[in-house]
Image (cartoon, rainbow, N blue to C red):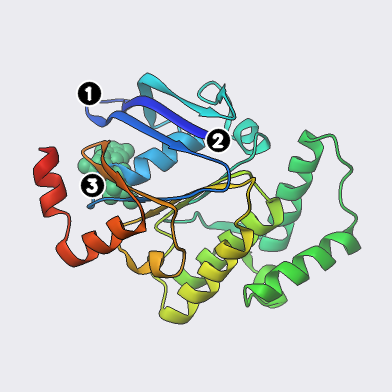
């Protein structure tokens, strides 16, 4: 279970508050969509969960399975089962995607007291997972995300997620920069990972992604707080009516 309790966050070097008492619970097996207009704090939430140090939590907590993650380093959060796919995946020139994936899988296995994968085991696992996402072995030889198209970056992130099998998945604007075919591949990849043990936070500005990844719950984030919660029909309402009436009610 992901529990975000009364979370207040500001920019580390400034007084500017971005999250202002955000409350959200996502149960195992649940896909929660987080929607909201630009600038409402969606990406900030994902960065704070990742442990990026540009942000400071001034109040509140984030718990995974009842345990606070705020004092954990990013790698400890990953070992606890947290995975984040960012709106703008970082490019790592000089590190072939394959090597990155192998290191990520092995460090996770090590944290769980498991043996490292042998190279043949690793290649077999990656080949299978990559095939499902329409990722070629050639693409995996290239440096991570470097010169990848928007769609390739998103598919590479879903591949990481499929390989790491995290319990808590946070996807920030996974639909941005995707054409309709890539959107379908990425959504199918996410849907294949849905399971009773796994919780998802799918952050998106548009309803489009939610036609492919049908959420269990929909939450509207505005000015750093959840101002409305509902089922998948709430996303359809937003698509038809925009954010204005819900924001108006919250203001
Ligand atoms: N590092 C930063 N420095 C200054 N302002 C920031 C920083 N990160 C986010 N913000 C501001 O915080 C607000 C929320 O941004 P963000 O979390 O990216 O929103 P969203 O993802 O919902 O569009 C915006 O007003 C943005 O300009
Ligand atoms: Mg954003």
Marks 2, 3: nearer the viewer: 2
Residue at numbered disc 3 = 39
Q: Residue at x 32, y 48 (%)?
A: 230
Disc 2, SS: loop
Q: Nearer the viewer, residue 158 or 24?
A: 24
Count the labels in the image.
Answer: 3
Q: Is residue 13 left or right of residue 194?
A: left
Residue 203 x/y as whole percent: 39, 52
Q: Residue at x 79, y 42 (%)?
A: 109
| Dot 3 beta carbon under 8 Å from ligand 1 | yes
Instruction: Mark 1: give few (<14), some (14-19) or many (20+) Cα within 10 Å.
Output: few
Disc 2 from disc 3: Cα separation: 27 Å
Q: Is residue 128 above or below residue 161?
A: below
Residue ranking furthest to the bottom: 181
Marks 2, 1: nearer the viewer: 2
Q: Is residue 152 above or below residue 3?
A: below
Residue at numbered disc 2 = 1
Q: Is residue 58 above or below residue 191?
A: above
Q: Could you tell me if the residues under marks 2 and 1 are in contact, i.e. CB atoms within 8 Å?
A: no
Q: Residue at x 64, y 45 (%)?
A: 197
Disc 1, SS: loop
Choose the circle earlier in sequence order: 2 or 3. Answer: 2
Residue at numbered disc 1 = 15
Q: Residue at x 76, y 65 (%)?
A: 126
Residue ranking furthest to the top: 59
Disc 2 from disc 1: Cα separation: 31 Å
């Amino acid at each position: 279970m992901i529990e975000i309790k009364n979370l207040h966050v500001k920019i580390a070097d400034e007084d500017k508050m971005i999250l202002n008492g955000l409350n959200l619970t996502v149960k195992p097996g649940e896909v929660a969509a987080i929607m909201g207009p630009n600038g409402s704090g969606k990406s900030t939430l994902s960065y704070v969960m990742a442990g990026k140090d540009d942000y400071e939590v001034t109040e509140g907590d984030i718990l995974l399975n009842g345990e606070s993650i705020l004092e954990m380093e990013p790698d400890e959060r990953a070992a606890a089962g947290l995975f984040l796919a960012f709106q703008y995946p970082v490019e790592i020139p000089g590190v072939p995607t394959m090597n990155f994936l192998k290191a990520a899988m092995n460090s996770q296995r090590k944290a769980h007291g498991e043996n490292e994968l042998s190279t043949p085991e690793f290649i077999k696992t990656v080949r299978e997972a990559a095939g499902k996402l329409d990722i070629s072995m050639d693409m995996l030889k290239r440096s991570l995300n470097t010169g990848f198209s928007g769609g390739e970056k998103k598919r590479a992130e879903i591949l990481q997620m499929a390989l790491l099998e995290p319990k808590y998945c946070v996807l920030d604007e996974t639909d941005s920069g995707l054409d309709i075919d890539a959107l379908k591949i990425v959504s199918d990849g996410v849907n294949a990972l849905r399971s009773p043990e796994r919780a998802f936070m799918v952050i998106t500005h548009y309803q489009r992604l939610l036609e492919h990844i049908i959420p269990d719950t929909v939450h509207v984030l505005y000015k750093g707080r959840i101002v409305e919660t509902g089922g998948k029909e709430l996303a359809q309402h937003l698509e038809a009516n925009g954010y204005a009436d819900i924001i108006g009610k919250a203001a």
